[in-house]
Image (cartoon, coloured by chain):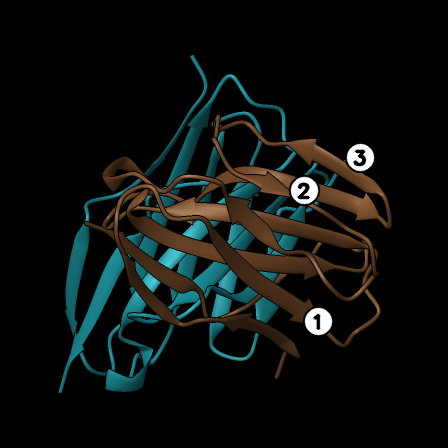
Chain colours: A cyan, B brown
Amino acid sequence: SQKIEQNSEALNIQEGKTATLTCNYTNYSPAYLQWYRQDPGRGPVFLLLIRENEKEKRKERLKVTFDTTLKQSLFHITASQPADSATYLCALDLGGANNLFFGTGTRLTVIP
Amino acid sequence: EADIYQTPRYLVIGTGKKITLECSQTMGHDKMYWYQQDPGMELHLIHYSYGVNSTEKGDLSSESTVSRIRTEHFPLTLESARPSHTSQYLCASSDGRNEQFFGPGTRLTVL
């Protein structure tokens, strides 16, 4: 069956450290992989998109890697801040219809 | 900030009532989506539309229906609400270049 797994439901890290979140998938062949941030009671907000032929993408303190052989994406937040505390969702886009398949998310807490 | 709106934000209603959840976007996007999300769970696509008069069911079966008479408007209707429909409903839109813009969601509770 098709599955998208994100590491541990919750991740706590100290302010200033790098947070690393993982997204593993099986039985999908995504053309793109997207990362979203979701705050409590709000809709997800798009952060980054990486294509299947890209290994790495950066945006300010965010970095995403995509390994289609391992079927895994890593999402890094460097120099983390308490304001980065939120749930982070990975989503697979198979291309074409642009319909997204979401993981359950990882709740990140950055401790001051 | 994305210009996509959902009303109501919260709705508590009795079993058997008909409800319509509203979703509007001012970005002129052709593609619109409805997702259902239970607490701590992933978003599941229940309906999508590629444009006016186009509607399709998503990968999660739902008893709700949708319509797309205008580009900016994509309402979701439940003819007879049941407690099993209690959930958060999220609307999103896209211009087809992959990124989806989400509304704030409607939290529905059916008693």
Which type of secondary structure does the marked residue at label 2 adopt? Answer: strand
Question: Mark 3 to mark 1: distance in Å?
Answer: 22 Å
Quarter of the figure that contains the N terminus of chain A: top left
Position of residue B30 relative to residue B37, above or below, is below
Write down the residue under mark 1: B25
Discs 2, 3: same chain: no
Mark 1 residue crowding within 10 angstroms, few (<14) / some (14–19) / many (20+): many
Q: Nearer the viewer, residue A112 or B15?
A: B15
Question: Mark 2 to mark 3: distance in Å?
Answer: 14 Å
Quick check: can you spot residue B17? yes
Q: Quadrant of residue B75?
A: bottom right
Q: Which kind of residue does numbered mark 3 sit on?
A: Gly
Question: Which callout, 2 or 1, points at the residue further toward the start of the chain?
Answer: 1
The answer to whether mark 3 and mark 1 are in CB contact below 8 A is no
- Residue that appears at 24% across and 40% down: B83
* Chain at tag 3: A
Write down the residue under mark 3: A96
Position of residue B94 relative to residue A7, above or below, is below
Position of residue B2 relative to residue B60, above or below, is below
Q: Position of residue B52 (x, y in %)?
A: 86, 50
* Chain at tag 1: B
Find residue B48 and name its label: 2
Question: Which numbered disc, 2 or 3, marks the residue closer to the eye?
Answer: 2
Question: Mark 2 to mark 1: distance in Å?
Answer: 14 Å
